[in-house]
C-alpha cells in the first residue's frame, strides 16, 4: 500500500472516530437536557401513570398486600416541598418570603379490604347469573348379597344474582393543583381505593338490607346462620372471652372440614389482648418481634380453629348500646362469593355539574374552574345459600 493510501485511511479512521465521539457527546447532552427539563417540569405526573398506580393500589388493597400498599402510599407522599406563586406581603408589612406548602396531605389510611381478601371472587360475563348449590346430599347404604341397592338423588337449587353499581365523584379546584402543587390526584385515588374496599366490607358484614346497601344483608344480620349468644350478664362486646369464641365454634357441623376465620373490631381484639390466665400471665403475648420492616405491624390471634382478623366496619366497644347485638362473625369465607361484573374504572371530568353528599350544593366544573375523578364499579354479593349458611357463626351479646 502506498504512503498516500495509508495517510488517507488513517485520516478516514480519525474522522470516523471523531464522528462517533461527537454523536456520543450529543447523546450525553441530550440526556442532560432531558434531565434538566424533567427536574423543572410540574410535579403532577401524567394521568396515565396515575391510573396505573391506581390499579396497582386497588389490587394491593384487594389482595391485602400491605407491603405494596404502604410503598405506593409513600410514593404518593414523597414529593418534597415547593414554593407557591403567592407574591403578596403580610398585613404587618413583613418581608416578602415565599410560602412553603408541603407536597403531601397527612391522613390515616384505614385498613379496609377484609371482604375482598376473604371472599371467593369471580368474574361475571353477564348481568344475570344462576349459582347452583346442593340442598340434599347422597347416602351410601349397607347392602346384603343379592339385595337391591337403593338410589340416592343429589338435589340442587340455585340462587340468581345481578351486579349492582357503586361509585363516587371526587372534585377539586385548579388552584389546589396549580398553586400549592399538592399531589391531590394521587391522594384522591388512594382514598378511593379505601372507599371501595370499605363498601365491600360493609356489605359483607354489617349491611341491613336497606337501599344504602343495594338491599343486601350482611352476615351479622343474616338469618339462618349459627348464632352464639354470650352468657347472661355479658351485655358488652368487651365481655367476650377466649372460652366464648371457642364455644361458638362448637356450632359448626362436625362432618365438614372448615377453614375458619373470625372477624371483629380492633377494640374487641385489644380487650382479648388484655386477657390473663390464672397465674396472671397474658394469654396472648403482647410483646413480640415484627417480621420485617417493609410490612405493616399485623398480629393475628389463633383461637380454637380460627384465625382472627380486625375490620374497622365491625361494631366497636365504644358504642353506646351493645346488649343483644351481634359483633363478631366466624366462618369459612370460601362460601361467600363476590361476582365482579366491572372492575373499578376511572374517568376524568372537566365539564359536568355534580352535587355534594347532602344533595344541595351544586358544583359546575367548567364555570368553577374545577375537575373531578369519577370512580365506578359493579359487583354482585352472593350471601351463602342453603346449607352454606352453616359455615358461619355470629357471636352476639346477651340481652340482659
Image (cartoon, rainbow, N blue to C red):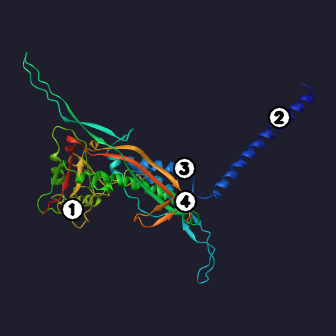
Q: CA distance from mark 2 to mark 1?
A: 86 Å
Q: Pick whichever of labels 2 and 4 is earlier in the sequence.
A: 2
Q: Secondary structure at mark 3?
A: helix
- Residue 222 spot, x, y in % from top left: 22, 51
Of tags 3 and 4, the one toward the viewer is: 3
Nearer-the-camera pick, 273 or 359: 359
Locate residue 357 relative to residue 288 in the image: left or right. Answer: right
Q: Is residue 339 above or below residue 106?
A: above
Nearer-the-camera pick, 262 or 385: 385
Q: Secondary structure at mark 4?
A: loop
Q: Pick whichever of labels 3 and 2 is earlier in the sequence.
A: 2
Q: CA distance from mark 3 to mark 4?
A: 15 Å
Rendered residue at 26%/56% (across/down): 208
Which residue lies under the disc numbered 2?
Answer: 13
Q: Is residue 56 above or below residue 287?
A: above
Disc 3: CA contacts within 10 A as few (<14), some (14-19) or many (>=20) = few
- Residue 151 spot, x, y in % from top left: 14, 24
Q: Pick whichever of labels 1 and 4 is earlier in the sequence.
A: 4
Of tags 3 and 1, the one toward the viewer is: 3
Which residue lies under the disc numbered 4?
Answer: 79
Q: Secondary structure at mark 1?
A: helix
Disc 1: CA contacts within 10 A as few (<14), some (14-19) or many (>=20) = some
Q: Is residue 375 above or below residue 389?
A: below
Which residue lies under the disc numbered 1?
Answer: 238
Which residue lies under the disc numbered 3?
Answer: 49
Count how many numbered circles sit on residues in the image: 4
Nearer-the-camera pick, 34 or 141: 141
Q: Pick whichever of labels 2 and 1 is earlier in the sequence.
A: 2
Amino acid at each position: 500500500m502506498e504512503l498516500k493510501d495509508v495517510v488517507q485511511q488513517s485520516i478516514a479512521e480519525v474522522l470516523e472516530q471523531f464522528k462517533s465521539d461527537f454523536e456520543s457527546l450529543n447523546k450525553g447532552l441530550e440526556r442532560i437536557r432531558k434531565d434538566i427539563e424533567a427536574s423543572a417540569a410540574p410535579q403532577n405526573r401524567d394521568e396515565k401513570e396515575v391510573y396505573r398506580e391506581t390499579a396497582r393500589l386497588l389490587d394491593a388493597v384487594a389482595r391485602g398486600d400491605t407491603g405494596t400498599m404502604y410503598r405506593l402510599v409513600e410514593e404518593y407522599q414523597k414529593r418534597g416541598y415547593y414554593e407557591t406563586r403567592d407574591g403578596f406581603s403580610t398585613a404587618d408589612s413583613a418581608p416578602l418570603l415565599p410560602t412553603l406548602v408541603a407536597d403531601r396531605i397527612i391522613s390515616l389510611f384505614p385498613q379496609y379490604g377484609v371482604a375482598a381478601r376473604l371472599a371467593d371472587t369471580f368474574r361475571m360475563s353477564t348481568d344475570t347469573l344462576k349459582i347452583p348449590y346442593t340442598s340434599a346430599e347422597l347416602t351410601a347404604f349397607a347392602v346384603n348379597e343379592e339385595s337391591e341397592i337403593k338410589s340416592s338423588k343429589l338435589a340442587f337449587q340455585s340462587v340468581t344474582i345481578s351486579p349492582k353499581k357503586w361509585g363516587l365523584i371526587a372534585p377539586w379546584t385548579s388552584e389546589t393543583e396549580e398553586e400549592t402543587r399538592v399531589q391531590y390526584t394521587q391522594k384522591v385515588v388512594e382514598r378511593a381505593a379505601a372507599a371501595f374496599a370499605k363498601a365491600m366490607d360493609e356489605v359483607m358484614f354489617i349491611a341491613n338490607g336497606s337501599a344504602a346497601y343495594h338491599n343486601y344483608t350482611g352476615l351479622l344480620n343474616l338469618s339462618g346462620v349459627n348464632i352464639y349468644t354470650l352468657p347472661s350478664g355479658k351485655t358488652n362486646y368487651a365481655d367476650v372471652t377466649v372460652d366464648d369464641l371457642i364455644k361458638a365454634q362448637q356450632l359448626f357441623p362436625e362432618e365438614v372440614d372448615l377453614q375458619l376465620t373470625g372477624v371483629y373490631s380492633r377494640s374487641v381484639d385489644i380487650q382479648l389482648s388484655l386477657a390473663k390466665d390464672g397465674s396472671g400471665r397474658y394469654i396472648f403475648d403482647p410483646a413480640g418481634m415484627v417480621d420485617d420492616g417493609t410490612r405493616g405491624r399485623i398480629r393475628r390471634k389463633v383461637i380454637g380453629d380460627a384465625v382472627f382478623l380486625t375490620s374497622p366496619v365491625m361494631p366497636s366497644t365504644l358504642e353506646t348500646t351493645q346488649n343483644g347485638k351481634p359483633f363478631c362473625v366466624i366462618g369459612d369465607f370460601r362460601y361467600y362469593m363476590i361476582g365482579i361484573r366491572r372492575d373499578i374504572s376511572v374517568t376524568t371530568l372537566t365539564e359536568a355539574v355534580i352535587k355534594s353528599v347532602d344533595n344541595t350544593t351544586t358544583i359546575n366544573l367548567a364555570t368553577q374552574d374545577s375537575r373531578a375523578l369519577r370512580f365506578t364499579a359493579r359487583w354482585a354479593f352472593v350471601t351463602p345459600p342453603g346449607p352454606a349458611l352453616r359455615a358461619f357463626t355470629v357471636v352476639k351479646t346477651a340481652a340482659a
